[in-house]
Image: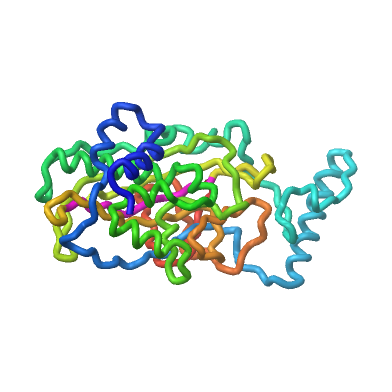
Amino acid sequence: MPHGDDLDARFNEVIAQIDEGERRRMRSSAAKGAKEGVTRQRAPRPPRRDRLPADHVPVDRGPRRLGRMSVALIALCAIVGAAGLVVTYRPDLLGGNPGLEALSVPANPVAPDDPFAGSPAEHYADGAAGLVMPAAKALGGLSKAEVAKGLERTRALLAAALLDRETLLGGRPKAFAGLLDPDQRVEFSKELGGKKYDSRQMVNSFAPGSAELATDVVKINGAARLGTFREDGLHGVKVDVNYLAVYAVRRPGVPATTMRLVSQLSGEVQLYRSDGKPALWVKWGMSSTPADCDIDDGFVHPVYEDDPPGSVAPTGPATDPYDLDVRPDFDGGCDTSQGT
């Protein structure tokens, strides 16, 4: 179990994009010992609840797909014919996944060289600059200094969950795990890749081979608020977190498929004392738009414009993926969403 300098080193790797002054202050807040006095009970494991545009409705996996492809090709030929051009149909040049049989023209194409232009994300902060914490104060039996250190660790955990490149591209979420308190770190590692619950759902991680980042910039917007909690015989400070992370992604090697994907991280971080020492416990979930609702493996599976609809229908009225006031239910369903 890593302690002391090992944990500090991992901590500094995660927050390298945060200014040096903050990093010096944050080093002192890394956990240095296991909680011995209290063992946290396992909280309910919320499944990821992703969102899809309303036009991605379930389809029969049989001959209907051929019909959809025929219609799409007829429409494409009509457009090409009107332009006075001749095109040879080559499925291997479309850039889609093998076996995809539907072609659609994006209604709101994203410029690969300026993917956030024209969206609310255009005005969001870049990266960790958007992870703004509230002012620390004495609360819930903790001193102002203890709350300040807890907020700094919370910010580092958010950065690891939303911005760590290795994690985003499907790698093992070592940065995030290394910042958890020892008890939760053991639990997180044990449940990583689990069938009933995959703890990878606590971080944003694109399924390997499903996406590449079109730009290193990730747009962040949201807020954290302080409150108190009582749970499992413990009491302390609750940091309510609600953030949007907007990524420009595309199929690997296919710039024409660039799109915006919006992820919402919502939940809380609990700060309290265990065996007389400051402790921390993370309780949050993720929801992404547009993402495949058919697959529940902890990873985010982006849905591109030319992907055929899946078998799970989005439900409910179409919600604005940029609306922070609408929080995911994390009940394993699939919500209908407006475009990103």
The answer to whether 100 appears left or right of 269 in the picture is right
Q: Position of residue 289 (x, y in %)?
A: 51, 52
Quadrant of the drawing holding the N terminus: bottom left
Magenta segment's dominant SS is: strand
Q: Is residue 320 visible?
A: no
Residue nearest the viewer, comparing 315 with 293: 293
Q: Which residues are magenta?
A: 261-272
Residue nearest the viewer, comparing 332 with 269: 269
What residue is shown at x 90% (from left), y 43% (from top)? 86
Q: Based on the displayed image, in which of its 4 quarters is residue 332 positioned?
A: bottom left
Residue nearest the viewer, comparing 190 with 292: 190
Q: Based on the displayed image, in which of its 4 quarters is residue 284 positioned?
A: bottom left
Q: Position of residue 133 (x, y in %)?
A: 27, 38
Q: Position of residue 44 (x, y in %)?
A: 32, 68
What residue is shown at x 76% (from left), y 48% (from top)? 94
Find out whether residue 263 is within the magenta segment. yes
Q: Position of residue 217 (x, y in %)?
A: 50, 34
